[in-house]
Structure formats: structure tokens, C-alpha cells
Amino acid sequence: MLSYCVRNALSRRLSILKASQCSTTLALQHTRGRSSTSSSEDLDPVRTLLQLCVDRYYISPGQTNVELFQRGVSCSYGPLGMELRRNLLEQWWHSVTRSTAQVFGINTLSSSRDTAAHGRGQLRIVESENLKQILEQQELSKEQLIQKVQTLLQRSPSVRGNFLQGALEQFVPSLELVNRKLPFGLAETGLCFQPSDGSGCPAEVTQTSLVWFCSPRTSSQWLDHWTLQRLKWWRKFALFPSNFSSSDVPEEELEEAASRGVRIIYSFPWGQETLETLWSRGDTKLLQTHKGVHSKLQCRDGHKSVPHVVSVTGNVDRGVMAFLSNSLQQLKKENGKQKLQQRKVLKLHPVLAPVKVALDIGSGATMELRQVCQGLVQEFTEAKISAWPGYLETLSTSMTARYDEMGVLFTVVISENTLESGLLQVRNRDTTIKETMHISEIKNFLSRYISAADNI
């Protein structure tokens, strides 16, 4: 069904055509956008990728922000980057919670004053004024000063570095939810803090977490299972799946009490980086968290044993960077004058692409064309198809290159022909093929295309 705005604009235009038996064409070509690249292409793939992310609204400009993004920590995202991260988080959540009926979502506190549950090296929240007052007490000796600072730190809440502890604390109440049967998992996403890498400034990271509780005799198999599932998930959305791989964590790098670890890795132009880490942790952490309640930890698995823990921790910010890097293609083509040009295309998976369709206007009555575009945007929004209102642009340069660099799946051009016959032009990002389609079909076409890509 076409919206009232679209139907009204089309019907009004058709009635005018019938009355006059002719139409007056206003040849106004509306294209917009800034120049995507200079004539001399930058051959450095890292610089090219980072500059494109800034130019096409994935991350905010600024050298510090770009460095944060390249490090794989939370940065200041632009509108498209924020939407890409949201899509990635949504797909992660669906893949984990729908893969089995026994995964439940939880939400734990980002900070805690329970110092008993945290060891040394925890990041703490300290009010600068309180610390300043202590440091300004010149009558204190060095030992007294250290003691006061330590007391302040002990009384200050700690911030989480991961979601493991919160899930372990939720184990006992969650066990009753599943009638004390294994296996089951607890999933959570959000911001965590990583200690500084020498700069003295902790970094925020958007993390995903699955903590899987299983019987001791099956923990090794479950680690293998989740490794395979996670690697398949990352490769599902990749243009070049072979860039994603897995490898065992060397024995000397195993975390405390972990018997085995696996990393999901992406090969960036500058080297390999870890996207997710899986650990087989045994029962040590669970017993430390629930001291004195050993009997409450036992499950109905035929043995009176404490469950083992398999944890899966992912870095979403680095995942965003991985898919942007993986999807960027620089294609060479000849223009009409036989000159070789380079075309940059961000071939993001249809499910992850922040913008599914861009709406442009061709030649014709500008006001009426915009009314049709507005109606289509409303229909797309109701169908949860993200649309870019390109028809509002006023610049006079071609937008095709800009949309390709933004990763827009389809470009729809509304023209005088649309007002006369209801036909519009649809361009595919990946094939560059343009086809004619009736305006009443475009919404269902996009929905089917995205749904089909998700089910592959």
C-alpha cells in the first residue's frame, strides 16, 4: 500500500496531465555531495579506510578520535557508525539468544562498592575534589598520605573490566529458573573499561559477553562448539570470510584458572587483532564468587559437581572496524573518455549496512517529486528500512560515488516519469545495474532482499 502522501502527489499529477494532454518538464537535476577523493588516490589502505570513515559519517573527525577507533576502543561515532554498531550488536544478540532456548539476557551494574568481589588492579571511580583535598594536606607524612589515598580508593566504587563477575553472581538465582538443569547461558552487552596501555587513561570498550554453564565432562566440547559458532557468525557477514580465523591461546598466555583459550582473529592491513576470546574456566571462579554455598551450586546432571564455566567475550568496537575494513573495495573503471578511475565501494552486508536505500530526484517538478520522496521515506520508516533523504541535498555533483562510499544498498531516483506512470529507477550498489520498478513494489522488494541476505 502506498502512503497517502505518495498517492495524493501521483493522483494530482495525473489529473493535471489528463486535463492538459501535455506536461511541462522542468529540467532540474538535483545531485549533491562533496568530492570523495582527490585525483591522486591514496595508496595506503589504512589511511584510505580511516579517511573514508570520517568523510562518510562513520566516526567523528579528529586525530585522537581516529586513533581510538583504530585501537578498537569506543570512540565518537557518526550517525552511520552508530547505526552500524547497533546493527552489529543486534545481530550478535539474536545469534546468541536464539541459537538455543537456554540463553537469558541480564543487566548488571557497571560499578560496585563490594570490594570483596574484586581483586587488585581494579579501576576505581574517585572524585577529583576528594583526592585534591588529601594531597593538599601538607602536614601529612608520606606514609599518612599513602594511607589516606588507599582508604579513599577502597571506599570508592570499582568499574567493570568485563561482564564475567556479574554473570557469576547471577548464577544461583538463574539456576532456579532452569530447574537446576544444565547447560544454560547468561548474555550481556554494554560498556566496560580497559586499563591504560601506558598512557594512564583507561579506555571504554563496547563488549559482548556470553557466560555458559555446563557439566565438567562436556566443557571442552562446548568450548569447541561456541568457537565454531562464533567463527561462522563473523564470516557470515564478511565480504572476504578468510580474513576471519581462530587460534588457540598459547599456554603461557592463559588467564588464571583457565585450562584453555581460543581467539577469534581478524587480519587488518596492519596486522592481526582479537575480536572475541573464549575461555574454558573450570569451576574456580564460580566457587570463589559463591563461598560457603557449595550445595546451591550443584545441578541435576547426574553428578553432584559444580558446573564449569565457558566464557565468550567480544569487542564490538573492533568488530565495527573489522567489517568496515573487510567491506571496502577499490575498483578501477574507465569513464567515457577512456580514463582510468578508481571507485571506492563499502560493500557492507545488507543486514549490517546503516542505510538501505537513498532517495534522489531527477528531472521534473521539484515540489511534487519531493512529496513523493517524503511519502516513500515514511513507508520505509514504518517497515524499519533505513532511508537516506538525498532529495534534500542542493549540491550539483553526482551522488553515486558518495552513496557507494557510505555503503548504501540501493539508490532510488524519482523523476517526471514516476509522476506520469509510477515507475522509478533503482540502482544496485554491488552490481551498479539500474532497473525500472513500479513505486508500489519498492518497499516489498527491499524487505525481501534484506531478509534473503539474512537467511543465507
Image (cartoon, rainbow, N blue to C red):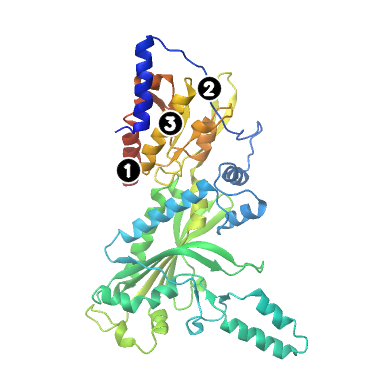
Residue sitting nearer the eye, 253 or 164: 164
Q: How far apart are marks 1 and 2 (CA)?
A: 33 Å
Quadrant where the C terminus is found in the figure: top left
Judged left or right of residue 382, residue 58 is right
How many other residues sit within 10 Å of disc 3, few (<14), some (14-19) or many (≥20)? many
Q: Earlier in the sequence, mark 2 or mark 3?
A: 2
Q: Earlier in the sequence, mark 1 or mark 2?
A: 2
Quadrant where the N terminus is found in the figure: top left
Does residue 434 lie above or below 37 as drawn? above
Q: Are marks 2 and 3 in contact (CB under 8 Å)?
A: no
SS at circle 3 = helix
Does residue 332 lie above or below 275 as drawn? above
Residue 451 circle label? 1
Q: Earlier in the sequence, mark 3 or mark 1?
A: 3
Residue sitting nearer the eye, 201 or 392: 392
Judged left or right of residue 354, residue 185 is left
Residue 29 circle label? 2
Instruction: List the residue tagged with mark 3.
Output: 373
